[in-house]
Image: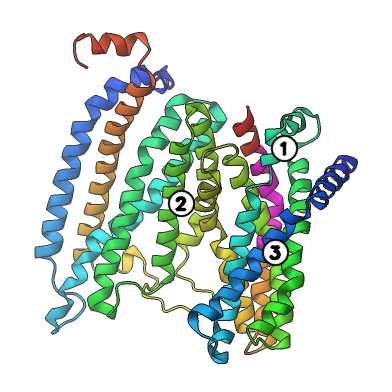
Amino acid sequence: MLGTFISILGRDLTLALRRRTDVLTVLFFFLIVVSLFPLGVGSERALLRELGPGVVWVAALLASMLALERLFAADHEDGTLEQMLLTPQPLGLLVLAKVLAHWLLTGLPLVLIAPLIAMQYHLQDSQMLIMMASLLLGTPTLGLIGAIGAALTLGLRGGGILLSLLILPLYIPILIYGEGAVTVSAIALADAEPYLMLLGALLLLALLLGPWAAAAALRISVE
Amino acid sequence: MNINWFKYASPAAFYPLAGRMIPWFAGVAAVLVVLSLLWGFLGTADQLGGSNPQKEYYRIIYIHVAGAWMSMWLYLVLAGWSAIGLVFNTRLSFMMAKAVAPTGAIFTFIALWTGAFWGRPSWGTYWDWDPRLTSELILFFLYIGYIALHSAIDDTRRADRAAALLAIVGLVMLPVIYWSINCPDPTQCAALHQRSAPGSIHPSIRWPMLGVTLGFWSYSFAVAFARLRDIILLREKDSAWVQGLLQGEPKQ
């Protein structure tokens, strides 16, 4: 079982690294969206400090959305997905491996680039650390929930738009707690702890139920 | 006693039964809603303001609260029929879920709309990101998502099952909506709603409010059954009994 998990993970990572632009597009989308806000609302320091946490999280949601469309699409088109459904391995595990690979390629870079965003928005260093922690806990949850939507909209006309319609409402709690953690850490660092714990709880819940629901969705879409 | 519980699980058997029940539910709904609203609008005293006649508008509560309750309850019904459909693979359950969804969306919209109309004179704003209003908005998005996904998939079987799964996944949001009165950080959200229990409401407000809710409930049955009959006809159009119906056999 572990072998399957690792081989799927390795395969997805190798495939993505052969086509690096796909990964970089998401990263640059995130950077551009975040950079647009100071141009749109003005570049006063106090205002940017206030807006920063929310903007980063909304941009992370949108970037995650953009990347999710491709999670199962390529495998669906060339028939790999059907072969995966036929294997005796638990499908939830396969989904988990794909989501993990997806997060390593599109979620983790967002966490790593967060210090740059924090500088753009004049956030304090402590806030930057909380921002990285909240993204680290929150972005895998986005991928796990999003996988359900990606599986449901597999191969549909206008699947991308539909995917955002289905999944963004479910992302709202993560947005609230992620943004909340960064915002309250401006006042006192310890205040961010409950928010991070809630994000962690959401991640555990998503780990427990997400792959299973996404696997059921895949079976519905492919049968 | 031996009751065949599954007799009405077949669309052909349920179609005439639904037809017979619609007038009853519609009638009960009309009577309850009209009488309760008359009682609520004309028969209850000004409970909030005392000397302030401006406070008369609190009577929006009869529609606002009943609509909000129905919006949440109908989502539970939608998810329940979806789960039954996925587990037992019964066609009628999916049709029920599909028939309920638009009514739920409409009640959610009514709750939001009346909330805005209440907020304007009370708090000087149509919309204040109050946790409960916001979570009703999320519920509205969930309904729209269900309807959009169902209509985006051409294959009926896949549409039914995919939308059902989405409805069940969305169920995780229902407790959030129900308990959203507890704001995680009171300094961050201005809560317009206060915690309240039916027992603590003045009886002259409580009873009309329950009357409207039951009326809305009855209306939901009538409308869902009417929509269900359309869905059944559409999906079973090739079957013998629908063909017979079309060729003017005695109306059921």
Task: Give the magenta-colored segment's residue range.
Answer: A200-215
Residue under circle 2? B142
Residue B131: % across, % down: 44, 70
Measure how far apart labels 2 and 3 are at the Cα level: 29 Å
Question: As displayed, is residue A111 above or below residue B146?
Answer: below
Residue at image x 53%, y 79%? A39
Q: In the rendered structure, which amino acid carries the disc numbered 3?
A: Leu
Residue B241 rendering spot, x and y as whole percentages? 32, 11
Q: Amino acid at mark 2?
A: Leu
Pointer 2 with pointer 3, Cβ within 8 A: no
Q: Main secondary structure of the magenta part?
A: helix
Name the chain letter of the residue that bears numbered label 3. A
Circle 3 is placed at which residue position? A27
Q: Is residue A211 within the magenta segment? A: yes
Q: Residue at x 45, y 59 (%)?
A: B138
Q: Earlier in the sequence, mark 3 or mark 1?
A: 3
Where is residue B106? Give x, y as percent.
31, 50
- Reading the image, the residue beneath label 1 is A75
